[in-house]
Amino acid sequence: MGGAAADCRPFGPDADDNYSDDQRFMAAALALSRQHTGQTGTNPSVGCVIVKDGVIIGAAVTAVGGRPHAETQALAKAGEAARGATAYVTLEPCSHYGRTPPCANALVAAGIARVVVCLADPDPRVSGRGFAILREAGITVETGVLEAEGRRTLAAYLMRQTKARAHVTLKLAVSKDGMIGRTGAGQVAITGPVSRANMQALRAETDAILVGIGTAIADDPELTVRLHGLEHRSPMRIVLDHHLRLPLTSKLVKTARNVPVILAALRTPPSALPGISPTGGEITPPPAHPFPNSPHASTPAAQASSATPHPTSATPPPASPARTQADGQAASSLISPPVGEMPGRAEGDNLAPTPAHPSADSALAPTPASDTAQALSTRRQHLVEAGVEILEVDDLASLLTALAARGLSSVLVEGGATVARAFLEAGLVDRILLLEGPVEIGEGGIESPLARTDIPQEYSAVRRLRFGEDCCSEYERDFQCLQVS
């Protein structure tokens, strides 16, 4: 296969196989921790390996739901053999009393002689205190082993703890000629089934997935997990929809009571970026107030509040539990039919004309120009009755802060081009996944907001992987806030 994807190869620190014993055992602990990524609530998914005389005698990962912690489970498996052993832990052992006693105290009581830690915990209840408990008990403590990989593994937790916002991954599927779709062609297959399986697995370990209203109307996606056996780990669905244009007949609305849906209405939307989204724009400029009948309209509180759920909306449940990374090669055949979503597509603008809505819904999804106070109020009422939450926020940064306050740590941005550029321009993208397929879109193609040749300089290449015929390049921004050891 020719083109950009032809030179797929690993690069960066992960390509180095010259690991010491400490690094090998820490790598095992990190691999354990990834098994429950997204399934441990507000707690981080931590891995712990107990080693004695070069042999693993106990290993565990934070349980689904966040308890029990990895250290106590691993110590229980090791039993009396833990005395004099070394514990490898991906995050500083907790030092505070909550629903369970501190893990640092449990390591001391078990007679552990040495503790090797990947990262310090930025949680103010823990930071440094866990290490102090261990050292005061005479235990040797070493930190920073595979720190870069640990920061990558726990990036979402660290972002929520240090910046009080959700961590953002931007995913784009790009053709060989740099396009994400074709004008008026509907959904276009750019990548293949292996990429699709891997991206479904990514959804399964993410707290929320986000698209713009242009994508939601043009593609009518469901944005759930379709990997067999992991359907229950679908993330919360978020649509940037200032004018409440999401049709009541859409798959998102119809399934809102099964998997939560939030319509995020930005009081100060980013620039409309004209010309990118003929479907009306992923993010459209606001009227004087998006909800004229809202008690928050035109009040000082409305201007000061950064995130106000609509008063008639039910508070959504915590982030859907998620999510074990599946093997894309094995899982690609286990995906249910991609109804409403084209495999490999980045869920972006397909720029097809907005489909006509049934007459029953036509009054609820007019173009922004026809918005009136009564129309907005009616649409709001019908959406809330269908189980959709409406969340008013000042801007994208406020949205991420509001999600973090609810305990959501990670957001996957899947479309479209306008939304991708808006997050990039706001400096809110922490990780980029660029999937490159072998197909060419040709005439009428919609240019991707990013290509491998123009990744912003503040992002570093992490790895490049082959998914069947496709290539997936991963980039991350090195936030100083993540240097927590």
Image (cartoon, helix red, strand yellow):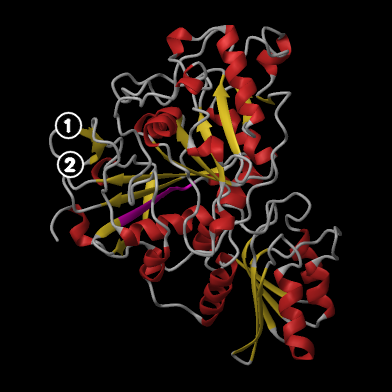
Task: Read off the magenta span.
Answer: 472-478
What residue would you read off at disc 2? Answer: 441
The residue most toward the front is 359
Residue 391 falls left or right of residue 170: right
Question: Which residue is at a point 28% across and 21% down the rendered structure image?
Answer: 275
Discs 1, 2 touching: Cβ within 8 Å: yes
In the picture, which quadrant includes the C terminus? bottom right
Element on which disc 1 rests = loop
Q: Is residue 476 magenta?
A: yes
Element on which disc 2 rests = loop
The residue under label 2 is which amino acid type? Ile
Residue 444 numbered mark, or none: 1
Front position in the image: 128 or 314: 314
> Would you say residue 328 is visible in this rendering?
no
Q: Is residue 157 magenta?
A: no
x then y, percent, for residue 253: 55, 35
